[in-house]
Image (tube, coloured by chain):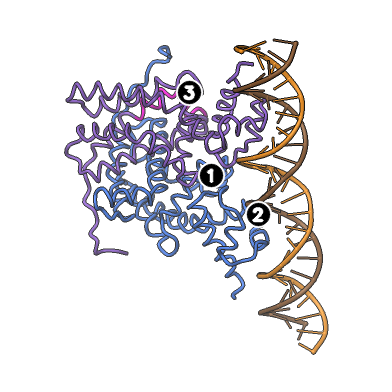
Chain colours: A blue, B purple, C orange, D brown
Amino acid sequence: MAQSDTVTRILDTAEALFAEKGFAETSLRTITSKAKVNLAAVNYHFGSKKALIQAVFARYLDPFCEQFNTELAALEKRGGVTLEELLETLARTTLSVPASKGSLSVFMRLLGLAYTQAQGHMRRYLQEHYGQTFARFSQQLKLCTPDLPDAERFWRIHFMLGSVVFTMSSLDALRDIAYNDYAEKTRIKDLVARMLPVVTVAMQAPVPELPLPSESA
Amino acid sequence: MAQSDTVTRILDTAEALFAEKGFAETSLRTITSKAKVNLAAVNYHFGSKKALIQAVFARYLDPFCEQFNTELAALEKRGGVTLEELLETLARTTLSVPASKGSLSVFMRLLGLAYTQAQGHMRRYLQEHYGQTFARFSQQLKLCTPDLPDAERFWRIHFMLGSVVFTMSSLDALRDIAYNDYAEKTRIKDLVARMLPVVTVAMQAPVPELPLPSESA
DNA sequence: TAATGTTTAAAACATCTGTTTTAACCACTA
DNA sequence: TAGTGGTTAAAACAGATGTTTTAAACATTA
């Protein structure tokens, strides 16, 4: 057995199990037994369960961010980018990167879990390691939507993010329903195609007037 | 101490802790000690931890569904409902019901957790107990958006749901950022006002052509 | 071949989990 | 007042969890 075959097998198995059942609900014993690896191997190779979780994310996000950064650099150099182009670039990069291993839906589900579960220690990790790329994307988005107040854009980014993460998180269940009820075999690619126009117009929706501070319940 | 004061205190504490740390990450010992209640009280009054989780949801959702059902009945009787009216009714009902106790953001976060965490046992519970009201809402939504293919509407509903659940789930963190970066003290009411136009136009976005099945990667 | 550093194996450790049990407590009725 | 039903208290139970330890196996280099 190659030296780091154990590491790969742990990562693959952990990734699948985390996505399926969540972080806290997945024990190291389940991971190691399913990966046909000794229990202590996780602590030996990764140090702790927490570090294993982060390693699972890094294996996805590191190549994604590298790719996305070069794409963003090209857009920055060119200039005059439209909202459609920017979002399409994001979607295309997302689709292109993780095609090799576990599907995109698995990772999206992990992302959703990281945000809601694990009392924010994962959130902090994501912010520290990938916040710079996100800021770069935000900057481009601001150039595409110059009429939007900053606060409004901020909230809409998270509306978008919520749509993506939530739908992808529940993808398996939703796909089953879509197949049963509408005979549609939805592929990830289809879902992204469905999301693009929705997100694009959502970002450009009219800016509402906020209710007055006085009239509180 | 009133007879069921213990029950209320368990529910209040569990609700807050679940929302803060998730279901699996919150132990009965943490709940009962914080609620100043004996450990065995949870199993005595609710039967199990799982049943306690469901009770937390029922305390929110039962009054909400009752209210929302009467609102929907009024709309059905009247007829000719617009998309804006339907969504506004949903938003207004959501805002009006849980104002008495723990804030809406707490419940929204619970809802998000229920969908992603707990490997679907909560999802099944929600479907069984509140699926009928949801179907009724879906029916009205279909009348409001007659040009939308059923499958497209199905996915967009979940895009919307994702926006709401995800944003509300992360509300505390996002609100802090919004306050620091944009000096905006976002209230739930403001957030709902921000969401309404976005969701409305998102539902009415142009229907995309899906990529051909042949051109797979 | 001998020695060295890395990886795996199996067991034990300490702690935490949800749940159950047993006894005490308390309010209320007969 | 005696007793009954509902509630609380404290302890124990059985099992699962992340982590650590000790020894064996392995590959690689001197």
Location of mark 1 (residue): A127
Q: Is residue B190 magenta?
A: yes
**Which stretch did the figure color magenta?**
B178-195
Location of mark 3 (residue): B185
Mark 3 falls within which chain? B
Q: Position of residue B98 (x, y in %)?
A: 44, 22
Cα–Cα gap, marks 1 and 3: 23 Å
- Tell me the element at label 1: helix
Q: Looking at the picture, which amino acid does disc 2 mark?
A: Ser
Visible residue check, residue A123: yes
CA neighbours of label 1 inside 10 A, class few (<14), some (14 to 19), many (20+): few
What residue is rendered at 62% in x and 58% in y? A29
- Tell me the element at label 3: loop
Please determine if labels 1 and 3 lie on a single subunit. Answer: no
Q: Is residue A170 magenta?
A: no
Q: Looking at the picture, which amino acid does disc 1 mark?
A: Gln
Cα–Cα gap, marks 2 and 1: 21 Å
Q: Quadrant of the N terminus of chain A?
A: bottom right
The answer to whether residue B156 is above or below residue A10 is above
Q: Which numbered disc, 2 or 1, marks the residue that appears first in the sequence?
A: 2
Location of mark 2 (residue): A48
User: What is the quadrant of residue D8 in the picture?
Assistant: top right
Magenta part, dominant SS: helix
Looking at the image, residue A161 sits to the left or right of residue B217; the answer is right
Front label number (2 vs 1): 2
Q: Position of residue A148 (x, y in %)?
A: 35, 32
- Tell me the element at label 2: loop
Mark 1 falls within which chain? A
Q: Looking at the picture, which amino acid does disc 3 mark?
A: Lys
Question: Which residue is nearer to you in this view: A66 or B153?
Answer: B153
The image's mark for residue A65 is: none
The answer to whether residue B168 is above or below residue A73 is above
